[in-house]
Image (spheres, grey):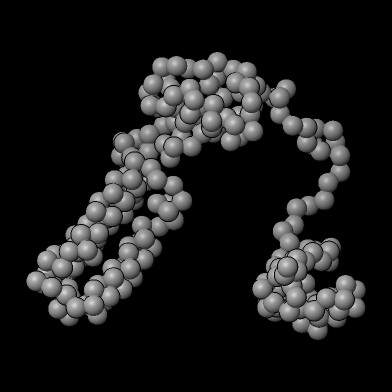
Amino acid sequence: MDFFAGQDSLTSIQWALRAIVGFFFLLIIAKAMGQRSISQLRFLDFVIALLIGNIIAHPLSDEGLGLKGSMITMSILIILYVACVLLSLRWQLLRKIFDPSPITLIENGQINYKNLHKARITVDILLSELRKEKTESIQKVALALWEPGGTISLFLNPKNQPITPADVALPTKPFTLPRTIIKERKIDQHELKQFGKDEQWIVNTLKNTYNVNVNDVLLATLDTDENLTFFLYK
């Protein structure tokens, strides 16, 4: 266990053990932080990510620094992080500090220049975000908000929104998500049972209807109407 403490030099095995311990400890840290910090970096998430990255990097590259101290420091930081997240759910003041309100960038086709400056973004960045949302004209935008996570929420004017079946009273079928029944040549027995099917059914269907073997299938899905879609290895 000498690799935990600072040393004048470390053997190759001790370096490897430090890396392994550091890797799995970071996995535990990331799990404790929750999906929020992984999916989006808000103010508090950004601060904790910088701290953790800096703390763990040094003992993994400098044998003179102990790993134990870094792990204790990171553990305390994660406890503080989780506590701040939980407290912000209860207290609005903390919530405003860690998760500030979105900033209005565009309203009724007009750019709010003061709020652009407040969000610290340029017109070029704004136009780039609009292009990502497949919007070529600012005049079509009813409202655009700069979210705390650094993303833009865009709402078009009603007259510029795409027509949906509901707008013209067209009948529609309920949405169903196709299930993956074969992935990389492996049949998912559990998903097949959801349709009341078994392995023999999919094997026979592929062979008799499409002259395809399961071992040739990269991906196959099935919906509630028993529409089979598959992709072969190329």
Q: In terms of image quadrants, where is residue 110?
A: top right
Q: Is residue 80 visible?
A: no
Quadrant for the C terminus, please. bottom right
The location of residue 173, given as percent across then percent down, is 82, 51
Q: Residue at x 75, y 75 (%)?
A: 216
Q: Is residue 204 above or below residue 104?
A: below
Q: Is residue 169 above or below residue 206?
A: above
Drawn side of residue 209 relative to residue 115, left or right: right
Q: Residue at x 75, y 53 (%)?
A: 175
For this rendering, which residue is in front, 78 or 200? Answer: 200
Drawn side of residue 200 relative to residue 138, left or right: right
Quadrant for the N terminus, please. bottom left
Q: Residue at x 86, y 39 (%)?
A: 170
For this rendering, which residue is in front, 232 or 38? Answer: 232
Drawn side of residue 4 relative to residue 16, left or right: left
For the image shown, how many numbered marks are present on the structure?
0
Q: Residue furthest left?
A: 8
Q: In terms of image quadrants, where is residue 134?
A: top right
Q: Residue at x 34, y 47 (%)?
A: 45
Q: Residue furthest bottom?
A: 200
Drawn side of residue 73 relative to residue 189, left or right: left
Q: In terms of image quadrants, where is residue 231?
A: bottom right
Q: Is residue 132 above or below residue 121?
A: below
The location of residue 57, given as percent across then percent down, is 25, 59
The location of residue 204, given as percent across then percent down, is 85, 81
Q: Residue furthest right?
A: 209
The location of residue 43, given as percent across then percent down, is 34, 41
For this rendering, which residue is in front, 130 or 145? Answer: 130
Q: Is residue 132 visible?
A: yes
